[in-house]
Image (cartoon, rainbow, N blue to C red):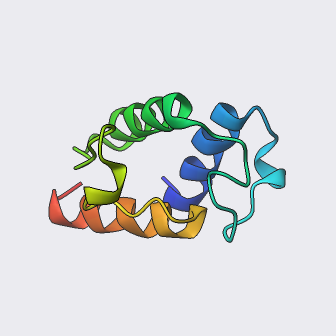
C-alpha cells in the first residue's frame, strides 16, 4: 500500500477535495480541515494502516504526531508504521 497516496486520499476526503488538489506542502488549515475533521482523519489513518497515533485532540500541539503539513503527516505515519512493525 502506498502510504503517501492513501494519506492524501484520507485528507482529501475530509477536506471534500479531489486527491489531486491536495499538495504535500499544504497545511490542514490551507485545506479547510477543522479540528473535528482532523480527528476523523486520525481515526481513518489508524484504521487504514492498523497503527496507533499518539494524538490528543485537546492538545494537538503537545502531540508526538506532526500535523504541520500533509508531508509531515505522511512522514509521521511512515515512522509509526516502522515503529509498530506494520
Quadrant (top left, top right, bottom left, bottom right) of the C terminus: bottom left
Give the left or right position of residue 46, taking residue 64 as reference: right
Q: Quadrant of residue 52?
A: top left
- The answer to which of 22 and 64 lies nearer the viewer is 64
Whole-percent x, y for residue 15 in the image: 70, 37
- The answer to which of 83 and 53 lies nearer the viewer is 53
> Residue drawn at (47%, 61%), measured in percent from left and top?
73
Q: Relative to 85, say whether 15 is above or below.
A: above
Q: Relative to 6, say whether 68 is above or below.
A: below
> Residue drawn at (49%, 37%), measured in percent from left and top?
41
Total residue callouts = 0
Whole-percent x, y for residue 71 in the image: 56, 69
Whole-percent x, y for residue 9 in the image: 64, 43
Q: Quadrant of residue 79?
A: bottom left
Give the left or right position of residue 69, taking residue 46 as reference: right
Q: Relative to 8, say whether 12 is above or below.
A: above
Give the left or right position of residue 79, taking residue 25 as reference: left
Give the left or right position of residue 62, taking residue 3 as reference: left
Whole-percent x, y for residue 37 in the image: 55, 31
Q: Work out which residue is located at the far left of the displayed protein and give it.
A: 84
- The answer to which of 74 and 29 lies nearer the viewer is 29
Amino acid at each position: 500500500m502506498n502510504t503517501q497516496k492513501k494519506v492524501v486520499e484520507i485528507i482529501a476526503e475530509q477536506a471534500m477535495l479531489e486527491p489531486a488538489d491536495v499538495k504535500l506542502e499544504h497545511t490542514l488549515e490551507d485545506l479547510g480541515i477543522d479540528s473535528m475533521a482532523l480527528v476523523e482523519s486520525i481515526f481513518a489513518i489508524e484504521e487504514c494502516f492498523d497503527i496507533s497515533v499518539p494524538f490528543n485532540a485537546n492538545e494537538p500541539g503537545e502531540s508526538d504526531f506532526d500535523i504541520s503539513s500533509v508531508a509531515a503527516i505522511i512522514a509521521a505515519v511512515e515512522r509509526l508504521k516502522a515503529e509498530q512493525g506494520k
